[in-house]
Image (cartoon, grey):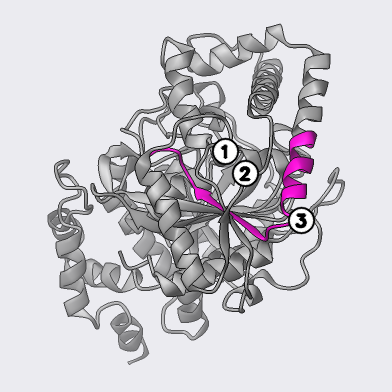
Amino acid sequence: MAQAQKTSRFSKNSGKLRWNISQLSNFLDTSNPCPVYSHHLERSFGQELMDRISDFEKYDGLGLADLVRRGEVKAIELLETVIRRIEALNPKVNAVVTRMYDQARAAIAAGLPVGPFTGVPYFLKGLHLLYAGVPTTYGSRFFADFVPDHDSTMTVRLKRAGLVICAKTNTPEFGQATGTDPVLFGSTRNPWNPNISCGGSSGGAAAAVAAGMVPMAHATDGGGSIRIPASCCALFGLKPTRARTPYGPDMGEGWSGAAVGHAVTRSVRDSAALLDVTAGPDVGDPYWAPPPAGSFLEEVGLDPGKLRIALCTVSFNGSPVDRVCIDAAQNAARLCQSLGHPVEEAQPQVDGAELREAQRVIVISSIRATLDARARVTGKSWTEENVERMTYASAKGADSVNGADYARSIQAIHRAGRQVGRFFEKYDVLLTPTLACAPLPLGQPDMMATDVEVFRDPLMRTIGFTSLFNAAGNPAMSVPLHWNDAGLPIGIQFAGRFGDEATLLRLAAQLEKARPWAGR
């Protein structure tokens, strides 16, 4: 009887099942932008799996954890459901590049820690975050055989929260692109339209969540790499404050403090709860974010009060902005006004050209250092044959910069941070489009382009609003509030004061309630 009750949790709503399958039935039909393919599921796994899939999609991560906690479903049942979903969906989205099924089953068999996400399957991005005994490729052929012998600090914290890590997701080589098309694994396709980019560099994570494999997945952001794919795939993507989450034990920071790790999620509360379990300094960290006043999850649903919101639709790096993105931001501003928040046009005054050059110097220097370190360990040289063209160009470009250039770049980054900090003395939140353009065609920007400018132009358009907050270190989030006439998502970015994720989470929950997105 108990088993029958547990099984019914995934089979009671046949009406919802028919709706889901009809909506998702044309995933392989590239003329139809709405994904998944019922006939494949029927042939491979039968009606029982389809029932389980239908009910699974109703829950976010905390919802699944609650089912496990109440004994309505077992952790192993959730894992096997997710494994079947990966095997059914991944051949067409190519979001998962490393399967960790044996490790996940072993973790459950050994007994999971009691935490807020006990029993919930979770994916790691294939960049930076290490899991002992599992390849971390950085999306690069040069790192294809890199297998760490230890976990990253964040991996330890995710495991401690009870999450069942069962896969790693696709990423462009070293996270340099805002699309996800590495030579090593091939392109990840956007579940909203397989001919459209899913964004990057956390594109595999975003596509996996948007396709319904899991309700949330690990992501990182060094110039927009959480917010950009969240925008392209209609998810919630929060980039936390600089050093809110640790990079240890192997690194103190990424890209001179620009990069930070967190997640893409369907719900705001999952993002907040994940931040609760991963935030805080590691032993020996060079610096850390201001401690929060309390739990991030407890901020979700609290009244944000009357926020002073600035609206900006001019990109910070000078890239042109599509009309649809301007319209989307203005529409979001009207929504905020309807919720009681005064909005006026304003923007931080930063030297976009100086900041762009500083970020370039930092990134190419970091890429070169990473490649040289791997070469020393393996005894193999990085060449045009084992790294992508833009990676090779970046690494060679580091020959033209020196220590003084790097020091000047750090000073420019700090200067931008102070300018942004002064801006937030007057405003609580800055509202912008997330991208300066609609989601790009699959394969753009192209890391294998023969002309650097061909790569750089779409890159600049996708990071035109996001990368400033990596330089300044402020928290920023992409919220899925708009869709264009082609049915593609257009995210809206909200940035806040340094250390103040709380205000953003309160506002995000208010927006989620006012204009829900999870059921679209």
Residue 138 appears left or right of 245: left
Kindly identify the residue that appears in the image at 35 percent across and 73 percent down.
58
Kindly identify the residue that appears in the image at 31 percent across and 33 percent down.
441
Figure check: 33 above or below 48: above
Q: Amino acid at mark 1?
A: Leu
Nearest-to-viewer mark from 3 and 1: 3
Q: Is residue 119 visible?
A: no
Mark 1–mark 2 CB contact (< 8 Å): yes
Q: Is residue 416 magenta?
A: yes
State the count of labels.
3
Residue 458, position in %: x, y? 43, 27
Quadrant location of the C terminus?
bottom left
Category of crowding for the residue at label 1, using alpha-carbon neighbours closer than 10 angstroms: few (below 14), some (14–19), many (at least 20): many
Give the residue pinned by disc 2: 129
Closest to the observer, 35 or 97: 35
Give the residue pinned by disc 3: 425
Instruction: Point out which mark residue 127 bears.
Output: 1
Mark 3–mark 2 CB contact (< 8 Å): no
